[in-house]
Amino acid sequence: MTAADRAARTAAADALCAKAYDDAGGPDTGAALVAVGGYGRGDMAPFSDLDLVLVSDEGVAEAHGIEWAELTGRVWYPLWDTGVKLDHSVRPLPEMLTAAEGDVRVGAGLLDVRHVAGDFNLTLRLRTTILAQWRRQARERLPELREMVRTRHQRVGELAHLSMPDLKEAEGGLRDATVLKGLTATWLVDVPAADLERCRTQLLDVRDVLHEAAGRATDRIAPEHWEALAAGLGLSDEGAAQRHVRELGRRVTHLSRLAWRRADDAVRRAPAARPRRPELERVAPGVALSKGEVVLEASARPADDPVLLLRAAAEAAVRDAVLAPPTAARLVRECAPLPEPWPDEARQQMVRLLAAGRGLLGVWETLEETGALARILPEWERIRLLPHASAIHRFTVDRHVVETCVEASALIRDVARPDVLVVAALLHDIGKGGLTEHSVAGEPIARAIAERMGFAPDEVDLIAQLVRRHLLLADLATTRDPDDPATIDALTEHVRTPEALALLTALTEADAKAASPKAWTSWRAGLVLDLSRRVRSSLERGTVPPAFRVEEIAVPEAARADGTSIAVEPVEDGARVTVVAPDRVGLLADVAATLALRRVPVRAARVWSQGDLGVSVWDVADEYLDAGALRHQLDAITARRVDPAARLAPRPAAEGELAPTVVVRPEASDHATVVEVRAADRIGVVYQVSAALAALDMTVRSAHVSTLGPQAVDVFYVQEASAGALSDTRAAEAAHGVRAAITGS
């Protein structure tokens, strides 16, 4: 859309630079002004820099009687005076060639060198020599370039999944498109040039519109830019703009991964003296392996073999090989449609594909990019490139689902039905994208898909049940008291066999690990696995063992001596703080205030009574805590020398921030009143809630604090100080008091 504007900006910049060179008296031979980087490629955005190098032959200054410092000043200063942003350097030709030979980053950057002014033959020599060096050294240099690319991807993330996509540096962005052109220039691998250029040009269009919308040079799309991007790109709305950008990123990512797989293979193989016919290794009926790619045998007949597409995909994934895109595209065109229900082999090959581990990712991308996925799973379109509403998720919904399958593949030894597990992993979020809660919406969709795949009726019921209840175990484990019989009952009401429980446990773990590391910490894993263990015992033997607490401790000597003990234990990325003190109304508020006043971010916490003592264990994101300083702070608060109320008063909600919710859940416990608080994660929330309850003379029997992304979920089991659950009136009073405390109303 904006290619003509880029060409006009480049032509104007060329004219400006050529005039500056000529006006400065730059020589016509032996020296040249060349453009590199984005300017060299002609990719000028509205606020792009000009990347220029003044290159010369050795001895040219003496031959022409030129003082280089004076000449360069006469070239650069007029350009600066026009207000353009200039990135410039002066280099002799031998120095440039040496730098390109010794630094892969410099060598790759100079592939885009373009003549602007001066000696054209010098520019031509520079280009041809750089390109010859690049091709000659490709086998030795590509591993270094590969590592640079991999490091950048790990640091920045993937364009298709970032909440604030970086059009240049992210995986699948403009930098990768440039690297792919460099790979093509080695002659070791081929990349679909027209497809790559289409994606690159459209990403440049997006960047041009982004610059205009932001009024400055930027490659990162902030949430407020989507509306302007949609208008500038002629798209219907913000959602269409997001989808457009993410599709481009995904396509470039796919091309990049295929190219690098082929480049790695080319580097490993010794150069052949002469071209040889490809060697085919038969790996399954109709399927062969050639140079690390799964292709079809010459005898394959796709029209007569409806399972051939799934068979080829499964073989590629299991072997962590490339499913050759031309092969996948041919199968889409020629393969007979699968009958419904699927034959047994089709279902088995689908399970093999989903359980293949990391090999699934690349194959699934190829199935999606070639349209094969629409034949196998037409329902996929409803979640394709769908952003997650929760900030804790690092991927879009479709990629999260595939990552869940990868995580589930490592857990298939823990369940009796691995086929049910991986299919449930594939379908657990299939209901997202609508107004109905996604597990409710997903159940009938998953049921229909499982029936189409040919699962038996009881297996279909199990898959549908796992999709419907895939959040239940984690929700109960992290927000309910494990000692309360109602917690066990809430799970066994829906999960009634050990087999279903094992599958739900594995799916819960895979789902959390695929979301982000924050969703499956050692703390959360311990809660989930402990509840699963106790429910399994209830299902198998009808008895419930006592809750296992990793934090359960013998009373420390310090607590026996003067009543209070604080211990700090280093853990990964933070610390675990254990506080033991005589139990009383307001103890939790005082401990929470101690941490809040020291600005300690709380990731999770558990609170309970142990005899006449109150025990609390806090996982915090501060690895430099001092137990003595915490004890001093707690003593000051307990003695009322420090009043935390004013310093921890609730702040007004930020613009766009969701209002906190306070809900009483009478069904959650028979022995206490459960108050659930969901609010923005900020310092002081636990103090505000527990102080409000203490002011009402209510005691917290146990509490469960979790932080997921920007949201805190705090659950308090509340009783009257004289013991017993709250009456309806008192429960309403508690909810009102807590709501007022955290909102300041």
Image (cartoon, helix red, strand yellow):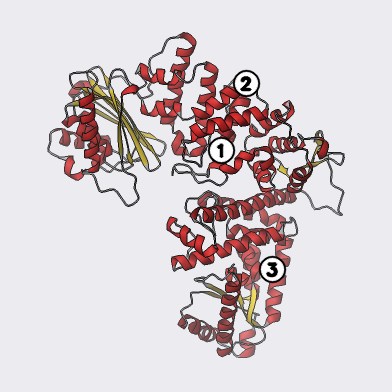
User: Residue 277: percent from the left, percent from the top?
Assistant: 87, 48
Which residue appears at 77% of the width and 35% of the height? 306
Regarding mark 1 in the picture, which secondary structure is present there?
A: helix
Q: Which of the two discs, 2 and 1, sits closer to the camera?
A: 2
Q: What element carries label 2?
A: helix
Compared to 673, does 174 lie above or below?
Answer: below
Label 3 – label 2 distance at C-alpha: 65 Å
Which residue is label 3 attached to? 130
Report how far apart the C-alphas of labels 3 and 1 lie in the structure: 44 Å
| Amino acid type assigned to the residue bearing label 3 in the image | Ile
Q: Nearer the viewer, residue 2 or 135?
A: 2
Q: Residue 457 carries which label?
A: 2
> Mark 3, mark 1: which one is toward the viewer?
1
Q: Residue 744 carries which label?
A: none
Along the polypeptide, which appears first: circle 3 or circle 2? 3
The amino acid at mark 1 is Val
Label 1 crowd (10 A; few <14 / some 14-19 / many >=20): many
Q: Which of marks 3 and 1 is nearer the N terminus?
A: 3
- Judged left or right of residue 490, residue 17 is right
Q: Mark 1 points at which residue?
A: 401
**Label 2 environment density (alpha carbons within 10 Å; few <14, some 14–19, many ≥20):** few
Q: In percent of the image, x 55 and y 75: which residue is there?
A: 89
Within 10 Å of the Cα at label 3, are there few (<14), some (14-19), or many (20+) other Cα atoms?
many
Q: Report the amino acid beneath label 2.
A: Pro
